Image (tube, rainbow, N blue to C red):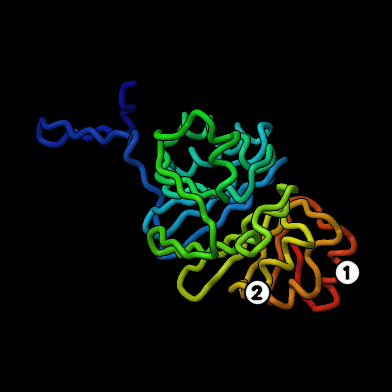
Amino acid sequence: TQPEVVNTTVVENVTVTVVAPLFDYNIPRFGNATFYVLNAVGETVFVLGSENETILLDTGSADDLKLLIKQLRNLGVNRIDALVLTRNSPETSGNIAAINSFFEIGKVYHNGISAFQEPLQGLQGIFAEEAIPLDTTKQVGRILLSFSVPYDDSEGYSQNPDDNAMAVKLTYGSASILYVPLCTLKCEGKIAGGNLRSDILIVGKRSCEATTLYFLGKVKPLAVTGMGELCGEVNKRLAIVGIQAY
């Protein structure tokens, strides 16, 4: 609880003490946004903007909680300005209550179903939340969040929760990254008409049916980052169109 003295200099009987910073430490910024794709069991991506804006895309699984908290603490984070839950599942939204205990949350965006189910049950009123019923764009600092949803048609929500997953495009300056952790073949077809063109595509542990050549043609990414090993068939498709996979 006491500041640690790291250097003491005596000048003309005046002692000047330099102490290590405690809670006001800020990592230097160089005008860029940084995306952290964590090596998690579930799915989670953290974004740190040039104005110290913070965005968390999904919260990973219960097994990822320690990793996630450690990563955010090491970056000096104490507040999450925007938390996006792309769908309601243990792999993407299981840690919302714990995250709320460790960090101040500005606003939570979700697909509308989560507001009436776990994990947001019992947390209403603690932080602001907003359902995304249609394709829309929000701004967090200098980063634009563009949501593409598959349920904004005459069919509405699907019985399969994975068919209701949101895709999130993050735009910073002229660069853009599309985050689609899990989207079924049906889901991909429904969101393909949106504004998906992005430099980098981040995909989760998806089936071999997803990440089709048609979908890749809509996104036109320069590179694809997978959270976990990509399916062999997906790797073949990426090789066909010359997209580097990481």
What is the quadrant of residue 238 in the picture? Answer: bottom right
Q: Give amino acid for label 1.
A: Lys
Question: Does the CB distance between marks 1 and 2 fall below 8 Å?
Answer: no
Residue appearing at x 60%, y 62% in the figure: 152
Q: Using the image, determine if residue 240 lies above or below residue 167.
A: below
Instruction: Residue 80: give x, y in percent of width and height.
Output: 44, 44
For the view shown, which residue lies furthest in the front direction? 154
Report the side of 77 relative to 2 (left or right). Answer: right
What is the quadrant of residue 153 in the picture? Answer: bottom right
Q: Distance between the residues labelled 1 and 2?
A: 24 Å
Q: For the residue carrying disc 1, how many other residues have a C-alpha within 10 Å: few (<14), some (14-19), or many (20+)?
A: few
Mark sitting earlier along the chain (1/2): 2
Instruction: Residue 245: give x, y in percent of width and height.
Output: 76, 65
The residue that disc 2 covers is 193
Q: Using the image, determine if residue 54 lies above or below residue 5.
A: below
Question: Which quarter of the image is occupied by the C terminus?
Answer: bottom right
The residue that disc 1 covers is 236
Which of the labelled discs sits on residue 226, or is there none?
A: none
Residue 198 appears in view: no
Residue appearing at x 31%, y 22% in the figure: 2
Camera-side mark, 1 or 2: 2
Residue appearing at x 74%, y 71% in the figure: 215
Instruction: Residue 149: give x, y in percent of width and height.
Output: 61, 61
Please tell me which residue lies in front, 220 or 194.
194
Q: Give amino acid for label 2.
A: Gly
Please tell me which residue lies in front, 51 or 197.
197
Q: Using the image, determine if residue 105 lies above or below residue 155.
A: above
Question: Which quarter of the image is occupied by the N terminus?
Answer: top left
Q: Using the image, determine if residue 175 lies above or below residue 103.
A: below
Secondary structure under tag 1 reads helix
Secondary structure under tag 2 reads loop
Residue 143 appears in view: yes
